[in-house]
Image (cartoon, rainbow, N blue to C red):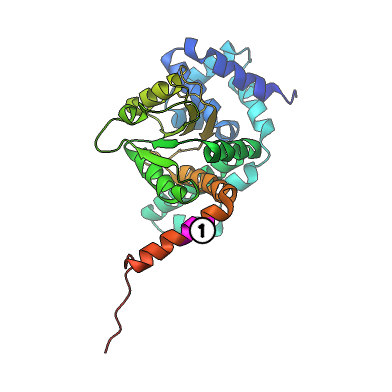
């Protein structure tokens, strides 16, 4: 089998996605975002996860020149080299599954969390992470924006990340819109935007506004295909596949932790000294609860 066939197929999906029907767009986006799952799962499971019909995937395979769904999937199955870790079913998960209905829920959620953390980390490129850390450290100002569920991830990234990156600013501030806070940006600044499906209008518009002003863009998201109009300098993609109604952020948080590890290393002595100063400040101001001794 041609070892480049998977790459060629993914490239064809990205190039043609704008011309696809709505269902085909959803299916193509799933294959692009979750190539390992696509390579492993049956057509019924793939259709269930992508929330389209099995016919959609059969039709997509034919449109791409494959004789069948299996032929379409085969390059992705062939490319799997780390699937053993994802498919692993630890004894502690299996033991919970056998206990009760809630044990099954526990086991499915736990296995999903382990899987998406693995997928989110294994797809990252070391060189790009190094470039991102350098871009952020050398920027004049770094803005960070997100809304709704993504805001929790942004808040954590800001809370810890500013120790290594003092130029980091979480926006919007003071009930403004993110665009208000980006109005004074200039070339040399960077915007970090976190958004996952369904993508926030406010966040996408803030990204487009920043790009027009010459600001570099780092997207932290769940897909390589977010908005055709955006051309971010860097995109970090995390899996958010879930067993419930909302995206699971285990993979996203693992990716953010990875980014912070690079920033802390790149920040060097200055970052370590800044962390010490924050810790000293909190201790001096009784920020931490201490149990009182009993007399």
Residue at the location (64% across, 40% down)?
126
The quadrant the C terminus occupies is bottom left
Farthest residue, direction bottom? 295
Residue pointed to by mark 1: 273
> What secondary structure characterizes most of the magenta part?
helix
Query: Residue 155 in the image: x percent, y percent?
Result: 37, 45
Asked whether residue 274 is drawn in magenta, I would say yes
Q: Is residue 270 above or below residue 60?
A: below
Query: Residue 242 in the image: x percent, y percent?
Result: 42, 40
Callout 1 environment at 10 Å: few (<14), some (14 to 19), or many (20+)?
A: some
Residue at the location (57% across, 46% down)?
262
Query: Residue 172 in the image: x percent, y percent?
Result: 31, 35
Asked whether residue 282 is drawn in magenta, I would say no
**In this rendering, does residue 215 appear at all?**
yes
Q: Between 44 and 198, which is closer to the camera in this rendering? A: 198
Residue at the location (24% across, 36% down)?
175
Query: Residue 88 in the image: x percent, y percent?
Result: 59, 49
Q: Between 219 and 43, which is closer to the camera in this rendering? A: 219
Would you identify the image quadrant in which residue 284 lies? bottom left
In the picture, measured across the screen, residue 130 lies left or right of residue 101, that is right
Which region is colored magenta?
A: 272-276
Q: Between 236 and 248, which is closer to the camera in this rendering? A: 236
**In this rendering, does residue 246 appear at all?**
no
């Amino acid at each position: 089998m041609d070892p480049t066939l998977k790459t060629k197929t993914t490239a064809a999906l990205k190039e043609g996605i704008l011309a696809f029907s709505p269902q085909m767009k959803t299916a193509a986006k799933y294959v692009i975002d979750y190539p390992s799952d696509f390579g492993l799962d049956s057509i019924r499971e793939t259709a269930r996860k992508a929330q389209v019909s099995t016919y959609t995937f059969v039709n997509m395979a034919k449109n791409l020149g494959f004789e069948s769904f299996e032929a379409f999937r085969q390059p992705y199955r062939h490319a799997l080299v780390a699937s053993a870790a994802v498919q692993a079913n630890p004894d502690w998960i299996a033991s919970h599954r056998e206990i009760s209905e809630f044990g099954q829920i526990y086991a499915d959620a736990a296995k999903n969390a382990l899987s998406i953390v693995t997928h989110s980390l294994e797809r990252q490129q070391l060189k790009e992470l190094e470039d991102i850390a350098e871009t952020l450290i050398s920027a004049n100002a770094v803005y960070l924006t997100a809304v709704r569920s993504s805001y929790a991830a942004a808040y954590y990234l800001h809370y810890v990340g500013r120790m290594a990156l003092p130029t980091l600013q979480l926006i919007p501030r003071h009930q403004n819109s993110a665009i208000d806070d980006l109005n004074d940006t200039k070339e040399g600044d960077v915007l970090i935007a976190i958004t996952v499906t369904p993508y926030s209008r406010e966040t996408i518009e803030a990204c487009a506004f920043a790009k027009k002003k010459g600001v570099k863009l780092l997207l932290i998201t769940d897909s390589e295909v977010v908005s055709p109009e955006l051309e971010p300098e860097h995109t970090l993609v995390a899996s958010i596949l879930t067993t419930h109604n909302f995206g699971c952020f285990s993979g996203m948080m693992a990716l953010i932790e990875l980014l912070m590890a690079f920033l802390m290393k790149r920040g060097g002595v200055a970052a370590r000294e800044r962390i010490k100063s924050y810790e000293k400040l909190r201790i001096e101001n009784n920020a931490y609860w201490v149990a009182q001794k009993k007399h």
